[in-house]
Image: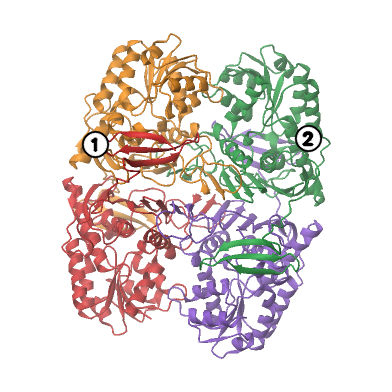
Chain colours: A red, B purple, C green, D orange
Amino acid sequence: MQRIAMLGSGFIGRFYAESIHGQRGRDRVVAIYARREESAKKFAEDYGCTFWSTDMEEVIAHPDVTMVCVALPNNLHEAAVMLCIKHKKAVVSTKPLGRNGAEALRMMQAIEGAGIFGGYLEDLCYTPKFLKSKQMVDNGALGRILWAKSRETHPGPHSNWFWDKEQAGGGCILDLGCHCIEIARNFIGKDIKPVEVMCWAATQVKPIEAEDHAIALVKYENGAIGQFEVSWTFRGGMDLRDEVMGTEGTIWMNNFLRTGFEVFTTGKGGDYVAEKAESNTGWLFPVGDEVNELGYNHMFTDMFRSVEEGTEPAETFYDGYVVNAIIDAAYKSAKTKLWEPVDLPVWRGQEGLTPVSTLIDYDADYYLIKEEVTHDGRHKVILKDKKTNEIIERDL
Amino acid sequence: MQRIAMLGSGFIGRFYAESIHGQRGRDRVVAIYARREESAKKFAEDYGCTFWSTDMEEVIAHPDVTMVCVALPNNLHEAAVMLCIKHKKAVVSTKPLGRNGAEALRMMQAIEGAGIFGGYLEDLCYTPKFLKSKQMVDNGALGRILWAKSRETHPGPHSNWFWDKEQAGGGCILDLGCHCIEIARNFIGKDIKPVEVMCWAATQVKPIEAEDHAIALVKYENGAIGQFEVSWTFRGGMDLRDEVMGTEGTIWMNNFLRTGFEVFTTGKGGDYVAEKAESNTGWLFPVGDEVNELGYNHMFTDMFRSVEEGTEPAETFYDGYVVNAIIDAAYKSAKTKLWEPVDLPVWRGQEGLTPVSTLIDYDADYYLIKEEVTHDGRHKVILKDKKTNEIIERDL
Amino acid sequence: MQRIAMLGSGFIGRFYAESIHGQRGRDRVVAIYARREESAKKFAEDYGCTFWSTDMEEVIAHPDVTMVCVALPNNLHEAAVMLCIKHKKAVVSTKPLGRNGAEALRMMQAIEGAGIFGGYLEDLCYTPKFLKSKQMVDNGALGRILWAKSRETHPGPHSNWFWDKEQAGGGCILDLGCHCIEIARNFIGKDIKPVEVMCWAATQVKPIEAEDHAIALVKYENGAIGQFEVSWTFRGGMDLRDEVMGTEGTIWMNNFLRTGFEVFTTGKGGDYVAEKAESNTGWLFPVGDEVNELGYNHMFTDMFRSVEEGTEPAETFYDGYVVNAIIDAAYKSAKTKLWEPVDLPVWRGQEGLTPVSTLIDYDADYYLIKEEVTHDGRHKVILKDKKTNEIIERDL
Amino acid sequence: MQRIAMLGSGFIGRFYAESIHGQRGRDRVVAIYARREESAKKFAEDYGCTFWSTDMEEVIAHPDVTMVCVALPNNLHEAAVMLCIKHKKAVVSTKPLGRNGAEALRMMQAIEGAGIFGGYLEDLCYTPKFLKSKQMVDNGALGRILWAKSRETHPGPHSNWFWDKEQAGGGCILDLGCHCIEIARNFIGKDIKPVEVMCWAATQVKPIEAEDHAIALVKYENGAIGQFEVSWTFRGGMDLRDEVMGTEGTIWMNNFLRTGFEVFTTGKGGDYVAEKAESNTGWLFPVGDEVNELGYNHMFTDMFRSVEEGTEPAETFYDGYVVNAIIDAAYKSAKTKLWEPVDLPVWRGQEGLTPVSTLIDYDADYYLIKEEVTHDGRHKVILKDKKTNEIIERDL
């Protein structure tokens, strides 16, 4: 059983607490830190915490607490983690780990140096669909992975600090791109080095300094390509879609807006107010069990089991740091308009990979381009002459 | 915390155990009864049970056990429940409750008489989509409910006893129709009396005595209509779809085969073996988290909380008995080819309802049939004269 | 080239004219009959007709006219067809053919007796998805057909005569059920005799005498089952879905409301008014090319080619008559609450079929119930002993 | 009526001919040119052409011919167009117009100089879904367009010349990207100047010199962004999806692989052979009416009407030239890894646009970032101080 100190009483802290206390969970949020007293008290009351304070260190240090959960604005992550280290408390942090790679690297090195458990709360790498997809990909169902794309767009976050570049460290790339990057990295392979990034970013709609829309490509050393599409300007709800292409298959995941649940209501039927302000009449697409669909259950289970069994969780501070490094390159690229290298002072995966050769022998003289049965029944191959490079068709 | 004795070590018993032990559950299956010693031992080993036996009563009576979970063939439910009563153990039973209404009524009256907790494990009334839909319907988002249909079809069950009419008590109506009936009943209203049933059933494909395909209509006292479509002959996977129509809205749920998760694989990529034998190459439609999507998590949470808090679970032995009574009428109707009344010696809902009047006043002289804006921009009403019954159009 | 006289200038007549004149069609609507002069004139102007009249016979008899298209309320079909016969004009009629089987039979026998071409404008048996499905079914892709269901529901028709039982002959069963019945009949086999019908019908919402919601089963002589679900009370648009189950496969068609085209609009963007009054903001699901998706193009092509080549179209007056006969049985059943026989004084298909035997030999001693690979890797068969009827499992 | 000379008897020429002769079309392919005599003869026989030849000029010059349809490999387009000009024949050309911008510009200037009709056969800008979407976007249903993405991927083309860089001029960017670019350009606005392109391209799977996978961003002068994703390595069928985001809405189109038509077949049912070699058992997703869904009907209707009425078709040689210019920039960018400017020596749209300001006044002191109702019922705004840039929340 884990006894958790929650740092932060906002939207995400409450979501975490509800997830941890949900179903028949044996773990409990026992302490809460919030900057404002009334927020801390309210949270403590709502979730049955035995201790609350507006002094972060006091909460972390509380003897009942076995693990600290960081659910604070991005600019406060590092200080919180350092306090956990000081008090030797296992820590899990919301995403992104830092505002940039340097912050994230310091956090990672600090917890590793201190021998403290550090889990990275990348919930979208724990959704049920993701977990099953990852297993399929690892089993080879898709062959060699060529491309992995993740898209996360919605009409913008709920709390004001997200919109403030200083506190958040950036805009939708930091807020949403961190998910997308780690999803793609999991499919392409965590041991495959991300080498460079090209990013377009713009502030198209909102009166803010940070970007509200961005698209980027992440090149991996083995020739695979990652892609993310993120925005705070999407209209229609929250769009969370991932796609993977391999030499032998394809995966399409829709995590939120099209999950086999469709409702039409004229709105005249009663007091009903829908969960999203975008629309509450007409066709609506609710999610059955948000906490589960968004990966919270599987994420906390992995974190708590790992700390109890002394193993590594699927998502660690090291992963958070790699993600931050890719984001840094994306921000740089958005400015310089160049493919920017990913700066990874620490790298623990494979090195020196090259793209796979595409020359598949058909026979001694030809490479195989394609074998197919056409709609008029011809069974044919398209071949390339190894010497002349001439491309021919041959009926079988 | 609940300490459960599982009766039955087959497919469903294992599924239950995995669900109970999943995530961070605080409850444990501590004892197992199976007819064959090696099955009991294997199950005990797999799920860490401290006690196993081929003597059912011994398992039920074991002092460590706080609740008994019946996961046996249908013909053994009643005996198991009676033993639970004898030993004063809370009991939850898999669906259907009995093979027929008489069995179910005896079980219900016995546990109620003994003051024992009795939960009906109707998992499909606990799926995340169902729970949210039910809440919407209860809040009036769909207006008055007119029709509720549930469809459950697949290529047939895994265990041999299902195919044996004596043990199972029937075919796919008992196996699958029990789900569908209770789903529709929840949407139409549990306090609305089901009055008669018309059922078509046939053995179209399988060399069995029981039906492998059936369709039925269940008429409710307030004029609403329930419908079920069940089959063991469907090709393509497991099809679980529910639909509800109300005067102000519509709900469509797809619980299994189209949930926003799509995979294509050539099958050449590796050792991958898919979860269903129907197809393991081409386009596949896996479910992310079966246990959650099928309602097991929410179901056991409701059962365990209810027994601990002394409240009624959402699905009780009474509900199981009503479902069995409707099934009895369906079987009778399939034989007599008549609308057969539902025999409910015990009924705890409303009585004497009549269908709602459809005469909506437009003004003193007319009833309103329809108001619409046509595609050429006319805003018009279609009205019915209260005296002459003449139907007219009027532009607004 | 066909020169068509359109009888009726309402919604369906206009839809037909637009379809015939659409794309690069070589055929032309040259004459129009309407009951009201201004309607006839307006239609003539809109579609470039050279002749209009409020005298139906005059229009039919016009020497320029090669074919008459009946687009009138149901109660006027018979008289129109009789006039076509009198003037020896090829005729195609909108659905349903008659208000009942007797009317339809008279029309069929009259045109056949006179040697006149008679086409039945059952557009939903000409949708692109239907045509391809039919071909697949005919090629055996689904094996033996077990069940064919068609669903057509929407918020009610546009013209007032539909709501008047005398003119229309009935409610949504006649209006929508005629489509569904013929769709199912095509899949099950037009030469398979429909033998009896069980129908539930009710007036749940509208202040009318006819039914606004109905569900029916149609039993075919070979044991296959047809099903229709029709309503004028559905909220959310027009729902046109067909499903077919065979021993070797399944088809699901969505013809209108989910065709891969999804639009979200806040409604603030401009003058945009959506095509359906049900909702014009939020998520909308338009159809790309209504005329094509609803089968009009392929239907008229078949009709015009057939009359020019002297062949039979896919849908004839005979088909219209069979459909009406099934509808008659449905109405009767809704009243008597009994399975009512389909009265077919003329029947041109197979006779005396019986359901297929389901006893598939596994070996000399056993019938095969099921062969499967379970999720734990067992490859097993479930068998039934030919003598004892005992059901056993055997690992392979 | 048009009398067409088809140049090219391959896959696309046949597809065009079938489309033109389909339904009740009044136009006819009357002459065919093919390089090989037997191909020309076979085509003439199949489609009832009265004239065939292996001499291209002879076919173009034939007095019966009113319009020439270029359905040749890319490297032969220019010569064919020049012959049409010589013989003063209206010409429509398959996509892409040229292998590069210079070729396309020469063709455009030559036909314009000669006063010849030149239509660009960009079928995917004529699909029913596209046409309706374009109308919605033009009506303002989506507000200001921010992003338009088009994706076209499949397992590779059927004819060998596509795989030969010299004949084709490139790989999947030329073959598929030309569609995607013009789709996005239509939504963003044809009068908005495309200014620069960033493209990633690779040969990941096929033993060819050209790219088999590419992703690119196209920046428009008003700040909107276009995106294309193209590949010849996709597994699972042909994936044609378009998405558009605007300030007031969203459009999602699936043109081919998910159109509401789903078939499962075990493959045991008969002789059935499916239309695509990727898979012919399991779940299949056919298209109802390919010719219509892919836009051929609407495209030829527009071309033939335009030439007869002396108007411009929706897609002209000018459009083809702009697309080729964007493709040139994409190829250059894929090599230089830089954002490359689009070189448009001729430009007929707006000039000098700048991105729209995102500063929306809330009141005298604040800009509005977001207004929302949160799930706990708060109605609040997020505002930005015009002077201090501070971001605050305010409850309403």
Give the percent coordinates (x, y) of residue C336. 82, 50
Chain that bears disc 1: D
Q: Which mark is residue C348?
A: 2
Q: Which mark is residue D331?
A: 1
Q: Note whether A93 is above or below A247 in the view shown.
A: below
Residue displayed at 26% across by 33% down: D326
Give the percent coordinates (x, y) of residue C52. 65, 16
Task: Say yes or no: labels 1 and 2 on the same chain.
Answer: no
Q: Which mark is residue A144?
A: none
Tag 2: amino acid: Arg
Residue displayed at 60% across by 26% down: C301
Which element carries disc 2, helix, strand or loop?
A: loop
Give the percent coordinates (x, y) of residue D6. 43, 20
- Horizontal placement of B393 versus D94: left or right? right
Q: Note whether B225 is above or below C107 in the view shown.
A: below
Which element carries disc 1, helix, strand or loop?
A: helix
Give the percent coordinates (x, y) of residue A30. 35, 79
